[in-house]
Each structure stands twice: as C-alpha cells, then as structure tokens.
Image (cartoon, rainbow, N blue to C red):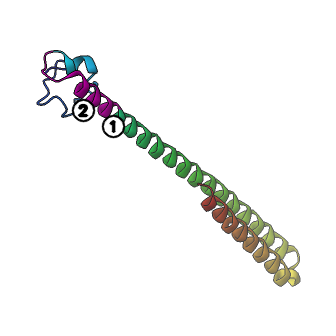
Amino acid sequence: MPCSFGVRHRAILWPPLCSFRCPLTLARLTENTSLPAKEARQASRQISLRRLETQIMEAQADSVTDVALTKIDSLTTATGNAMAQITRVTQLQRQLEMMAPDAAARLAFIADDHALGCAELLAELRRDLRRIR
C-alpha cells in the first residue's frame, strides 16, 4: 500500500514509518484493506505509541548531550582561566625575585600555594559538575 509519499510498504504494519518518516494513519490502514476496524485502530495506536517513544528517547539523548557539552565548556573555561592566572602569578614572582633575591623562597611558596589553590578549586568544580545530572 503506498504511503502519502508514494512509497509502497510491503506489509500493513511494517515498517510503521516509511523511509520518509510518513505515518501510516488509521485511514491508510482501513482503506483498501480487509482489516477489521478494531484491528486497524489497535495497529494505529501501536504505531503512534512507538513513534512517541522514539521521540521521547531522542529528546532525552539531546538533553543529556547538551548537559555534557555545557559541563565540558564550563570546565574548559575554568581551567583556562586558572592556567592564565597561574602564569600571571609566576611572571610576577620572577619580577619580584629580580628586585629582592633574598625573598625567592617565600615568593615561590606563595606562588605554589596559589597554584595548589587553583587546582583545588578546579577539583571542587569537577565534583560539583559530576553531581549535576
């Protein structure tokens, strides 16, 4: 039986959607067939239910993908910002060491503490992002 796109389906119930995604409607199932109306209605309901289930699964997959991409973007932005700030602190440390070589150990301690703080905040961000479903 041809669908609205002119595609001939091999059987009334297979495939429920042709390759052009045109639905086989109740009218298509009852016209030119010897199917009783009750069976045609049941078949039409099954086709509609399967189509709805497919749409729900596609929407869920899209939603999960969007959340994952947003998480990746957030973590990338935070990591890049942390790296830029650590670089800035390191450059300042070198400049200050040139001005006061005696304070090199203290400046290195402060710079290392800053880097560790950034790493800790990034780890906390990753944990928080994992909790978001």
**Residue 37 magenta-highlighted:** yes
According to the picture, the residue beneath numbered tag 2 turns out to be 16
Location of residue 105 with respect to 18 vertically, above or below: below
Cα distance between the residues tagged 1 and 2: 8 Å
Describe residue 41's horizontal placement relative to residue 116 as left or right: left
Q: Position of residue 117 (x, y in %)?
A: 76, 71
Q: Which picture quadrant has residue 54? A: top left
Location of residue 107 with respect to 20 vertically, above or below: below
* Marks 1,2: beta carbons within 8 A: yes
Q: Which residue is rendered at x = 28% and y = 21% of the image?
A: 25
Q: Which picture quadrant has residue 24? A: top left
Q: Quick one: SS at disc 2?
A: loop
Q: Position of residue 77 (x, y in %)?
A: 64, 53
Location of residue 88 with respect to 116 vertically, above or below: above
Is residue 88 at least partly visible in the picture? yes
Location of residue 111 with respect to 84 vertically, above or below: below
Q: Position of residue 33 (x, y in %)?
A: 13, 20
According to the picture, the residue beneath numbered tag 1 turns out to be 50
Q: Residues within 10 Å of mark 2 (few under 14, many from 20)?
A: many
Q: Which residue is rendered at x = 70% and y = 62% of the image?
A: 82
Describe residue 64's horizontal placement relative to residue 114 as left or right: left
Q: Main secondary structure of the magenta part?
A: helix
Q: Which residue is rendered at x = 23% and y = 21% of the image?
A: 37
Q: Which residues are magenta?
A: 32-48
